[in-house]
Image: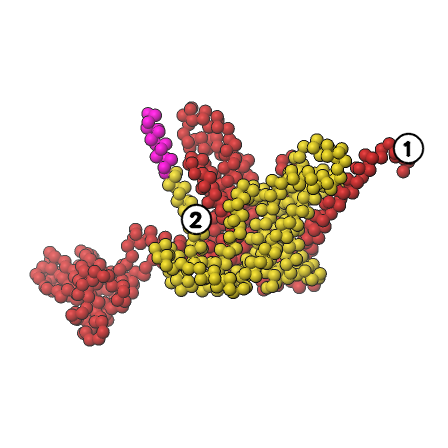
Chain colours: A yellow, B red
Amino acid sequence: MSSHTGRTRWLGNSVVQVFLVLVALVWVTPLAGLFLSSLRSEQDNASNGWWTSLIDPAQLSVDNYRALFEESGLVSAFWNTVLISVPTTVLVVGIAALAGYAFAWLSFPARDAVFLVVVGLLVVPVQIGLLPVAKLFGAVGLFGTVAGVIIFHVAYGLPFAVFLLRNYFAEIPKEMLEAARLDGGSEWRIFLRLILPLGRPAIASLAIFQFLWVWNDMLVALLFADSESQPLTVALQSQMRQFGSNIGVLAPGAFLSLVVPLVVFFAFQKHFVQGVMAGSVK
Amino acid sequence: MSHTPKARAAADPRRRALRRRRLLGMLFVLPALLLLGALVVYPVVFSVGRSLFDASGDRFVGAANYMEMFQDPATLKAVRNSAIWVVVAPVLLTGLGLVLAVLTEKVRWATAFKLVLFLPMAVSFLAAGIIFRLAYEQNPDRGVLNAAIVGVHDAIDEPSPYPTARAREGKGLSGSPGEGYTTVEVRPGGDIVLPFVGVAPEAVPHRAAPAWTPEPSAGSLSGAVYLDFTPGAGGRQGQIDPKENGLPGVTVEVLRGGTVVASTRTGDNGSFRFDDLGDDAYTLRVPASNFAAGYTGVDWLGPALVTPAIIGAYLWVWTGFSMVLIGAGLAAIPRDALEAARVDGATEGQIFRKITVPLLAPVLTVVFVTLVINVMKVFDLVYIIAPGPVQEEANVLATRMWLVSFGGGNDQGLGSALSVLLLLLVVPAMIFNIRRFRKGGA
């Protein structure tokens, strides 16, 4: 009897293993397809599938990437992406850390009511800001600039950032804070020397989430950036119309945009997962 | 105001610190509140106002833009598609996440598996869009999904041997590739040649041999199906010439009075033979199945399937999220409850339904609500994957809003109304968040 159930359990388990292997394969295949396509010539991509290169690796070369780096359009778009996402991340973390500390440990009129409004703003869709902010930016000369894209991203990144950091800072034991205050530390010093170091895990998760969010954004930059300031996503999007005849540009371009998030993903797995999980309330 | 200097002195250092803290507090939140006020709160108010005016913003139209949403066919289509998205995607994702989370608990390489499924969360929707445009390509020689489907299909149901072939006209066969070809009535003892053209040299199987010249014998019907084309020049139409090959694998039927009495396939030299036939009048038929066009897979990005196809890409991105979150909830379920049930003889299925799912209900709710909010705002994937001509079939609220406001529609009144609708749809989630927070949870 027991050997029988043991056997069915073993059998069931190998069915599960096979099933999960298949699922994992299904998940990897599209990504592998993009990568291999990016290494194949335009003619090969037009005439047969990327999987033929598994049998015939001679198809693969880095020529597409070489062409991509020589043709400056996508490279400058790549630098625009860096130029947009790094300052945005720094600003969001900085501004939200200050506000988070104030909401958690400083008192001012209507503090908790204001914080509830911030919680309410968590789910406000970006779409509602597009038209009004475009008019606003047009009036002050920010429309079509990197700065405009950054400012918009910062504003829409703040509700979640403030929410996350305020909640994390609020968990810091009260005694630690009061001891620091009794020692005569100024609030500014306490913020820099106590709150920021203690809040590091939350700040790391937030920074990673925010960075990837902006790095991967297309919609905001599609409206607020012009052809000079456009990031990689927008530059690639503008090539979608010729899809089919320009896979030699689109596939390596898309892979270029993937590399940084993938590196971040593998380097900071734990913070990445935590950041995405926490950020999903947006 | 009534403070005496003495009282002021007593309260002093503490009160001063408190006042400083209060001032500093306001200073610290100021940058955040300024940005939120100008770029988030003000736009909400502006959009609500703007949605009550016409396209150019000159004329007050009341709720007309909101009425139009449900009358303009293109916008109505987007409303419908969004409804499909919001119902289908979160349900599938939560279900898939639950099943995978339970199954990964049973294997040792769960961490690696979770890593693979979570990976797409790092990928931009734009890149995911390009990835799936490639995968969904209609041509099975290029799109991996159709390549797989056609492969499986042709393994089960053999493809027709000669999709391009047609009979040499006026040489004994009448009909068409779509209906099949028939001969005139023949009697056993006779022989017959069935000439075909329209087969490219590379489409002729390697095993094809020079066409067989029939040898009549009593009581049987025999003949050859062959490619009536001599490479180079020469050759007579409707007759077997020395350099002409038979067509192997062609199905030939023999009919008596309209019903099929026997059927066979031609050999390598195109020969077929029916023995033991009575002395009746027969017709031979080369049925249409020989000429059926090859199966070319599914038109994923055509108007009918484009929305399910894009939802498929969305599943690829988000399944890892739902699985990891549910997995964390699963890990928190007390082991003793499960063990006790197992000892009591409960099956795995019973345990799953009666214990695991009810205990997981709060986590499942959070996953579901989160997904609904995110699905509501889906933009990039639809914008990227749907090819231009079917964009309208695939539109959701966010893409329609974009097209109406900025993508040539140039109707900022309707665009604002659509963005307000998007906001209204997430208000329940907003209330859910605030409630959850006030209850003390983060």
Q: Quadrant of residue A194?
A: top right
The C terminus of chain B is located in which quarter? Answer: top right
Rendered residue at 85%/33% (across/down): B11
Residue span colored magenta: A1-15
Does A7 appear in magenta? yes
Where residue B79 appears, as percent x and y from the top left, is 55, 53
* Closest to the observer, A52 or B432: A52
Where residue B173 appears, as percent x and y from the top left, is 21, 67
Amino acid type at circle 2 is: Val
Determine whether, in the image, residue A261 is placed left or right of residue A200: left
State if disc 1 and disc 2 touch (CB < 8 Å). no
Rendered residue at 44%/62% (across/down): A63
Where residue A38 appears, as percent x and y from the top left, is 45, 58
Question: Is residue A273 shown above or below A4?
Answer: below
Secondary structure at badge 2 equals: helix
Chain of the residue where label 2 is placed in the rendered structure: A
Does A239 appear in magenta? no
